[in-house]
Amino acid sequence: MTSQMPDYVRDSEHTHPPLDSPDYRSTVLRHPTRPLTLLPQRLTELTGPVLGEDRIGVGDNDLTAQHRGEPLGQRIIVHGRLLDGDGKPVPHSLIEIWQANAGGRYRHDRDTWDCPLDPNFDGVGRTLTDGAGRYEFTTVKPGAYPWGNHHNAWRPAHIHFSLFGRAFTQRLVTQMYFPDDPLFFQDPIFNAVPEPGRRLLISRFDYVRTEPARALAFEFDIVLRGRQATPFENEEDDHDD
């Protein structure tokens, strides 16, 4: 008896950005120039490696408590659910984030713009979703930063997310933005995503989850596939931008 492999093909027509987005200049060198070849999912690709709870350290989801001192900036809570294409929660799934500090600087050798590093902030975290697909991070709101894509180019404040779904080979990467950012109008990465998918990248301010005198809260649900799938990047675009 042959078991049916699940279908992980995502609907990209109205959700995901085109591979070649001229306004985002580096896509000229990154996007495929030949027709893609669809490789079938096989059992070994869907069953390993297993990323269990023993891979998560204490405090990995609190980016403000990884050093002796407190990082600079507005403390925030980012929370939400990880869902499949049918709206069902994806439990016990690894989620990783990375981001710039409150001034817009990454702790990375390639980031050399004139903004100080924060000795109490590394900008990376990880967690597992719970049995209901929920996740939560405590961090600081990242700052905007300049980049060389076009004249007076600034990236809106954002947090990178890496999702692993139910298997390592299903890794997807996306970016979470903040509501009413004044830099949306000139950012080609954000604007390469067609509507209505673009709005799925913007978190929702959550006053109910805001903690008095401690942290603002933002909700960001992530859908792995289907018509409501969160727009994702290509793995080769997985970098500080």
Image (cartoon, rainbow, N blue to C red):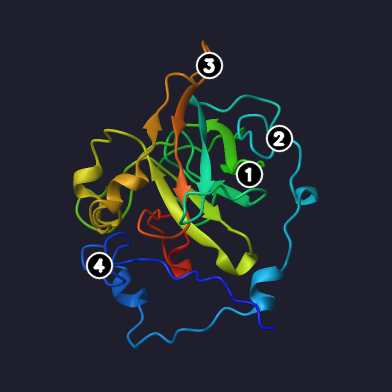
- Which residue is disc 2 drawn over? 59
Mark carried by residue 211: 3
Disc 1 residue type? Thr
* SS for dot 2: loop
| Quarter of the image with the N terminus in it | bottom right
The residue labelled by disc 4 is: 21
Instruction: Using the image, determine if residue 113 lies above or below residue 211.
Output: below
Mark 4: which amino acid? Ser
Q: Position of residue 187 (x, y in %)?
A: 25, 50
User: Is any part of residue 74 visible from this angle?
Assistant: no
Quote the CA–CA distance across marks 1 and 4.
33 Å
- First in residue order: circle 2 vs circle 3: 2
Q: CA distance from mark 1 to mark 3?
A: 21 Å
Q: What whole-number distance in Å separates the C-alpha atoms at marks 2 and 3?
A: 18 Å
The earlier-in-sequence mark between 3 and 4 is: 4
Q: Marks 4 and 3: in contact by CB < 8 Å?
A: no
Marker disc for residue 165: none
What is the three-letter code of the residue carrying label 2?
Gly
**Amino acid type of the residue tagged 3 in the rendering:** Glu
